[in-house]
Amino acid sequence: MLARTITFRCSEAQLCRMQQAIGQTDANRAALINAALEDFLDFAESPDIRSLDLFALVDTVDAQGGGCLFGDQA
C-alpha cells in the first residue's frame, strides 16, 4: 500500500485532547490519529451505523458518552 500524507485541522479542544492522549501513551501524533481513524471506520462500517445520515451519526456518536459532544469540539 502506498502511504499518503493527510493534513487535519482541529479545534483547540481537539488539539488539547490529542496532546493529552499522546502524553499518556508512547504513541506519536501520526500513530494516535491512525488508530483513532481505524477505530472510527470500524464503527462507521457496521450495518446499523452505515445506514445513518450525517446528523443521526453525530447524535449516535454523542450518545456513546465518554468524551466531549461533537458540537463542542467542531
Image: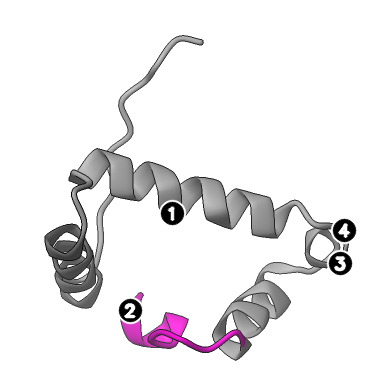
Mark linked to residue 50: none
Mark linked to residue 73: 2
Q: Which residue is mark 3?
A: 48
Q: Tell whether label 3 touches label 2 (CB within 8 Å).
A: no
The residues tagged by marks 4 and 2 sit, at their Cα atoms, a distance apart of: 26 Å
- Residue sitting at x 41%, y 84%: 67
- In the displayed structure image, the side of residue 61 where residue 21 appears, left or right: left
| Count of numbered tags | 4
Q: Tell whether label 4 touches label 3 (CB within 8 Å).
A: yes
| Local crowd size for mark 4, using a 10 Å CA cut-off: few (<14), some (14–19), many (≥20) | few
Tag 3: residue type? Asp
Dominant SS in magenta: loop
Classify residue 70 by image quadrant: bottom left
Q: Which residue is mark 1?
A: 36
x and y percent of residue 29 in the render?
20, 46
Of residues 51 and 34, which is closer to you in this image? 34
Q: Tell whether label 1 touches label 4 (CB within 8 Å).
A: no
x and y percent of residue 66 in the render?
46, 86
The earlier-in-sequence mark between 1 and 3 is 1
Q: Tell whether label 1 touches label 2 (CB within 8 Å).
A: no
Mark linked to residue 47: 4
Tag 2: residue type? Gln
Of residues 33 and 27, which is closer to you in this image? 27
- In the displayed structure image, the side of residue 10 where residue 43 appears, left or right: right
The earlier-in-sequence mark between 4 and 2 is 4
Q: Which residues are magenta?
A: 64-74
| Local crowd size for mark 1, using a 10 Å CA cut-off: few (<14), some (14–19), many (≥20) | few
